[in-house]
Amino acid sequence: MTVARIRGAIAAAWAAGALAAPSLAAQDDAAGAVDSRTPIVVASKPFAESYLLAEAFAQLLEASGYAVDRRPGLGMTELALGALIRGDIDVYPEYTGTGLAAVLGESAAGGSAAVFRRVSEEFEARWGVRWLPPLGFENTYAIAMRRDVADSLDVRTLSGLAAVAQDLAGGFSPDFIGRADGLDGLAAAYGIRFRESRSLLQAVKYQALAEDAVDVIDAYSTDGAISRYDLALLADDRNFFPPYDAAPLVSRKLYADRPGAVLVLTRLAGRIDEEAVQRANERIEVDAAPIPVAARELLADVGMIDAPGDEARSPSASRRTRSTVAALPGYMWTNRADLGRQFGRHLLLVLASLGAAILVALPAGVVLERRRSLAEGTIRLSGLLQTIPGIALLAFMIPLFGIGVAPAVVALFLYSLLPILRNTYTGIIEAAPDAVAAGRALGMTEVQLLGRVRLPLAAPVIMAGVRTAAVINVGTATLAAFIGAGGLGDPIVAGLTLSDPVMILSGAVPSAVLALFVDWGLARAEVAVAPKGVAEGRR
Amino acid sequence: MALIAVEGAVKRYGSTLALDGVTLEVEAGACVALVGESGSGKTTLLRSINRLTELDRGRVVVRGEPVDSMDAVELRRSIGYVQQDGGLIPHWTCLDNASLVPALLGLGDPEEHGRDAIRAAGLDPAVFAERYPRELSGGQRQRVAIARAMAAGPDILLMDEPFGALDAITRNQARTTFTALRESLGVTAILVTHDMAEALEVATRIAVMRAGRIVLEAPAGQLLGEATGYAAELLDKSGVGP
C-alpha cells in the first residue's frame, strides 16, 4: 500500500539517527541546555487511546533516564494544543487529520504523507510546535452501526447511510458534533440528515448503540469496543475524513533544548501498527487493564522494551470483574497513594483559592460599606462571575495562566469572591445599626466600631459566606482535572472516559465526603464565632 | 456666658432646608426641650452640637470653644448621648456598655464608673451588670443607656426622643429618674421630643421648632401663657392646651 510505504519512509528517515544513541538523557545534559532532572511534561486528551499513547511516551522516556510529569486527560484539542504552544506541556499524542481539519480548518488534499507535510509546515510556522514522525497507525473517525441493523437496511457506505438516515437516530461525542471534520461536514458532504441526533459522552456511546437507544454513532477506528460489540463500520466512499495518523506533537522548547528526548520519542516512528494499538485498546476497554499495564504491554509488543512479568497479564488486574460498590474500598486501598496525593492536591486547590478569596473579599466588603455607591455594581459584577459555568471559567483562565494549579486556583478564587463579599457587606450593614450610631455618638472611632462592634456581630454572616464558597469550591475543583490541575477530578475524568464506575467513585466519594465535612465544620465555626448575647450565640 | 451656643446654624440636605438660621443659647444647668413635628429640624440641631452633623453655615460653641476647632471624637466623649432605642451594643453586657465612655477616656477603673452609673440610673448592678441587653425590658435598657451616657460624668447630655419607645407607665418612671439624676448631678441637657407634655414635665426651657426655625422659645413655666399660633396648636395636640 502506497500510503503505508510513504509513512514508513518518513518514519525511517526520522528514526535513522535515533536508534544509535545509547544514553540520551545524558546527551541533553552534555548539551548543557537543560538539567536532565527537569521533568518532561507528557499530556493526553481525555480518551482511552490518548491516555495509552501518552503513558507509552512517558514509560519510554523514563526508560531512557528522563524524569516525567504526567498530565493526562486535558480537556480537548484546543486546550491540549494551547498548553503545548505555551510550553506548559512538552508532548502529547495527536492525529494529523485532527490537526488539519479541526485546528487548521482545511480539508484533506492528498494522502497521509501530504497531510503530514501540511500540518508539519503549518504548525511549525504558526506556533513552532513540531510533529514527530507518525507512530505507524491511523485512527480515523468511523461511523458505526450495529451489524444486524446495517445488514437489515443493507447499509455498507456513508452514501448508503444518507438514503436511510431520516429514519435513524444518531448519538455523537460532543467533540465530533462541534468539529469541521465532524457531523456538520459529514452532513454536507453526503447529504446525511438524521431523524434526531444527540450528544453522548464517549463512555456511554457504545452502550447506547448496543441498547438500541441510538442507531448510528461516531467511533474511532481503533476502538477496542468495535470488536467487543461487533459493530459495522461504514465505508467513507467519498473520502470525507482526512487521514488521522497518530504522532507525538512536541513543544518548541522540548524540540530545541532536549534533542535526546526527541530522539527517544522518534524511536516509536512506524513501530506501532493498527493491530498492536487495537490490541492495547481492547486490553483497556474490554479486559479493563490499567493504562500503565496496557502501555507497558504495547511497548513490549512492538519490541521497544522487554516483555512485562506475568502478574501484569493476570485476570486479577482486570477492573471489570468487580461489582462496583463492593470493589470500591479495595480499589481505593490499592490506589491509596495516588488517591492520597489527589486528595492533598484537591485540598490545596480549595484552601489556596478560599484563603485568597477571604484575604480579598473581606477587606473589600468592609471598604464597600464605606463606599456604598460602588457596592451594588461590585457585588453584581462578582455575581456575574458566578453565572459562568465552572468548566468555561476554567477554560477562560488558560490563555492567561496556562494549565495546571495556577489557573485552577484563580478560577476557584473568582468563584469564592461573591459569597464572601456579599455576606461581609450585608453582615456589616445589618450589624446593630442603632448600637453603631450610639457608639459613634459617644466617641467610638470608626476603627473601634468596626473591630469591636460591627465585625464581631457580622462574623456569623461572614462565616456563612465562607462556608458557601468552600462547599462550591470542593465541588468545582473536581473540574480542575480538565486543565491539568489534578485533584480528585483526575480519577473522575479518567473513569468517565474509560467507563469505569469504580474509578469514578474513587474520586467522587472522597470529594463528596470532603464537601460534607467542610460544610459541617464551617457550620460549627459559624456558631462558634457568633458573639455571646445575641441570639445566634445561644443555639 | 452660655455653656452651649448655636449661632445662625444652616444645614441643607439636598433640596430640604433642615436648619434655616437657628440661634439658641443654653445656660449651664438648664434642660432645654426641642419640640416639633417630624422634619422640623430638631434632631439635626441636636446632632450639630456634638458634630454628628456638620453645619453648612453658622457655628456651635461649647464651653466657649467653637466645636469645629475641636477633635470630633474627643468632643463626643465629653458629652453624654442617649437615643430613642437605647442603642446598647448587643454582645456586650450592661456593665461593658455602661463602662464604654470611661474606658474610651482611659479613666482609672472604668467598671467602677459603670457600676456607679447603673446604680444612679435606678438599677442594681449586682443584678444587671452581667446581663446582656436582650435579657432586659425596654425600660431597663433605656436606664442602662442613660447610665452609659452619664458614666464618665459629662457636664452636657444630649437626648433624642429618649422615652419615645417606652409604654406610658415606664415612661413616667424613666422621666422621674432622669429629672432626679439631672438635678442631683447638675447636668446641662438638651432633649428632643415631639411630645409637648413630656417637654413641660422634664425641661426648664422649651424651644418650639418648625421648618428649620425656632418659632418660640420660653421658660417651661411661661409657655402656656405665651403660646400663640403654631405653639398653641402643638400644645393642643399634646392635650395640655390652655
Image: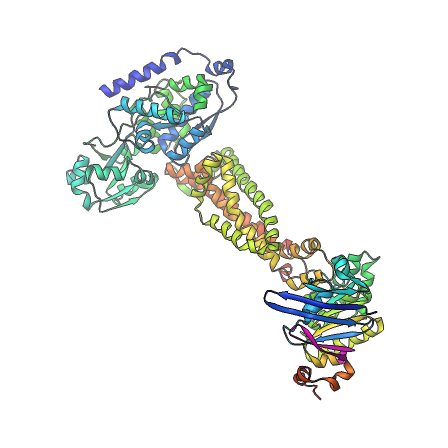
Does B222 appear above or below A320?
below
Residue A103 at x, y = what percent?
Answer: 34, 32
In the rendered structure, does residue A503 fall within the stretch colored magenta? no
Q: Residue furthest top?
A: A20
Residue A534 at x, y = what percent?
Answer: 65, 61
Is there any visible trace of residue B163 in the rendered image? no
Q: Nearer the viewer, residue A286 or B97?
A: B97
In the visual, does A461 lie left or right of A505?
Answer: right
Q: Residue furthest bottom?
A: B242
Q: Nearer the viewer, residue A360 or A466?
A: A360
Residue A327 at x, y = what percent?
Answer: 43, 39
Residue A8 at x, y = what percent?
Answer: 29, 17
In the visual, does A346 lie left or right of A217?
Answer: right
Among the 4 quarters of the image, the one containing residue B128:
bottom right
Does A474 appear above or below B84?
above
Report the residue at 19% width, 37% height from top.
A190
User: What residue range appears in magenta?
Assistant: B201-219
Report the residue at 64% width, 56% height from top.
A530
Report the residue at 78% width, 71% height from top.
B25
Among the 4 quarters of the image, the one containing residue B173:
bottom right
Q: Nearer the viewer, residue A287 or A469?
A: A469
Does B181 appear above or below A206?
below
Q: Work out which quarter of the rendered image holds the C terminus of chain A and state it.
A: bottom right
Does B208 appear above or below A63?
below
